[in-house]
Image: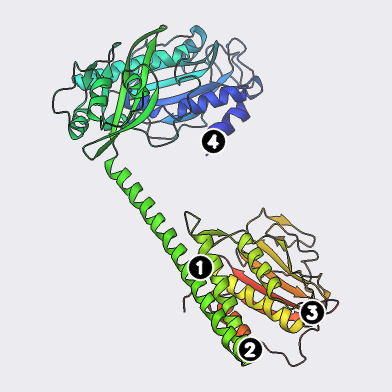
Amino acid sequence: MPTLTDLVRDHTDLTETDLEWLHALVSDWQLLADLSFADLLLWVPLRSADALPAEAGSRGGRGRRGRMDTGAAVPGWVAIAQMRPTTGPTAYPEDLVGKVVRTGRRGLIDVAWRERRIVREGDPEWGSGIPVREESIPVRRGAKILGVIQRSTNLSSARTPSRLELTYLQSASDLATMIAEGRFPVPGEEPNMVRSPRVGDGLMRLDRSGKVTYASPNAQSAYRRLGFPADLVGEALGQITADLCDTGEPMEEALSVVLSGRAPREVEVESRGSIMQLRTIPLVVGGTRIGAIVLCRDVTELRWRDRELMTKDATIREIHHRVKNNLQTVAALLRLQARRLRIPEGRAALDEAVRRVGSIAIVHETLSHTPDELIDFDDIADRVITMAGEVSTPETKVTPKRSGSFGVLPAEIATPLAMALTELLQNALEHGLANRFGTLEVVARRYGEGEQRREPGGVEVWGEWPVPGAHEPRAPHERAPHEEEPAEGAGRRLVTVVADDGVGLPADFDVESTTSLGLQIVRTLIVGELGGRLDFRPRAGGGTEVVVDVPLDHVHRRF
């Protein structure tokens, strides 16, 4: 189904400013539908190029299909938005958004557009088998009429209205007048895009002085929970609310002004353990403020859940902080023990343990500063790379570097990946670049998240990095340096290449049968825990490339 924006841009001459006004209106017109007990359809005029041909014999037409109705003020109308009431039966169960009609088929809309006024004349329509009362409300922005709201009330369940219903209808009439005068939505006010109180949550009607003239049963109950047991009618809402919420602390000065109906705003008040959300809509008709509508909603449970989540998030961050501190303490103890050892092999083993513990501590330190379990891994990778460069021997003179981006990763991937990266960097420095000058680079690329595009040969490639010649397989030595192709249709993947220009791999090297503890750890983390692929191969021009291909949508196992 096309969106409001699509319909306006494709079929009308309305400007972007007009479109913003219509978005603000539609974001808030559930209120008008509920107060009216009626369906709402927003019609805007078609541009001339989209005009419909007149039907044979139609009023104002030329009696021949394919000719334009040139006698009309506008060629036709397109429905760009629809809203059904939650307080009554709908008049239009079918979706009408995108429907286009010729001028003359909706007579009240034409009159409202032409005469720039609300039109309520006419008898109920029975076209769908039920009586429907139609009204038309012009939508004004400044001096310009943007469109017309068709308000359709299902009369099949009509009965003598109660005082609540009469108050709803009067408030709906006032809001309709404000729309026709260009006063609603309120100019300069942000569109209501969050969960605000609805009509059924609780409604109060105020007079010009800010006193309550009507309070729905739900509104009365909400104030009883705040601690006001008496009837709200006749009370100054701003004053009694300020008194209920008076805790001795400085209060917002605007609270009394807002709840007196003089300013449009949403506020939250708290008293006796209850939290209530209030929204004030001043009613300005004919340039005169006649009162206000105040909607209220009890949000106690919702806010308590929010506070519990915030507390849990803070607790989790504190846990990560303490884990990081404990890991750093363990690393410090291992360093002290290594200094006391006289056996070189034992000291080297403890130094490796210190690096492994340090890489995990870096992840927990990052998690202690984030509100969720998602981490910008580039910062972690840079710190791991720097740590590897600092512990390299002075004879190597190697400064590792990174290119590409790891992006944001969940903690369940970041922790094992950081540890595996530490091992691979250390292995390259100790074996591939031992006692020699050289380069050591980490290249990171993500696939499966960009726009789909077609490369030569008809192969569809996903991702931000093109794969040259992807239509024909190549041997590892034929690829460009650090280039890696993820499997076709493999989903979202992170491919990391650790490359050096050192002595290269031994002729009989096999990662599955190696006795190196570090490489066994890497294989367990990447293949076993992350469900990825690990590949050691010669680098074009000499040296070694280690390719780590990790699926980002994999259900990871814990060991």
Q: CA distance from mark 4 to mark 1?
A: 38 Å
Residue that label 2 marks: 516
Labels 4 and 3: the sequence-earlier one: 4
Q: Residues within 10 Å of mark 4 (few under 14, many from 20)?
A: few
Q: Nearer the viewer, mark 4 or mark 1?
A: 1
Q: Quadrant of residue 14?
A: top right
Q: Nearer the viewer, mark 4 or mark 2?
A: 2
Tell me which amino acid carries mark 3.
Glu
Q: Secondary structure at mark 3?
A: loop
Q: CA distance from mark 4 to mark 2?
A: 59 Å
Asked if residue 544 is positioned above or below residue 482 in the image, the reply reads below
Residue that label 1 marks: 412
Q: Is residue 546 visible?
A: yes
Tell me which amino acid carries mark 2.
Ser
Q: Secondary structure at mark 1?
A: helix
Please report the residue visible at 34 percent of the width from the left and 48 percent of the height from the top.
307
Instruction: State if disc 2 and disc 4 touch (CB < 8 Å).
Output: no
Picture disc at residue 395: 3
Instruction: State if disc 1 and disc 3 touch (CB < 8 Å).
Output: no
Colouring method of the image? rainbow
Q: Secondary structure at mark 4?
A: loop
Labels 3 and 1: the sequence-earlier one: 3
Tell me which amino acid carries mark 4.
Thr
Q: Is residue 515 visible?
A: no
Labels 4 and 1: the sequence-earlier one: 4
Front-most of 251 and 485?
251
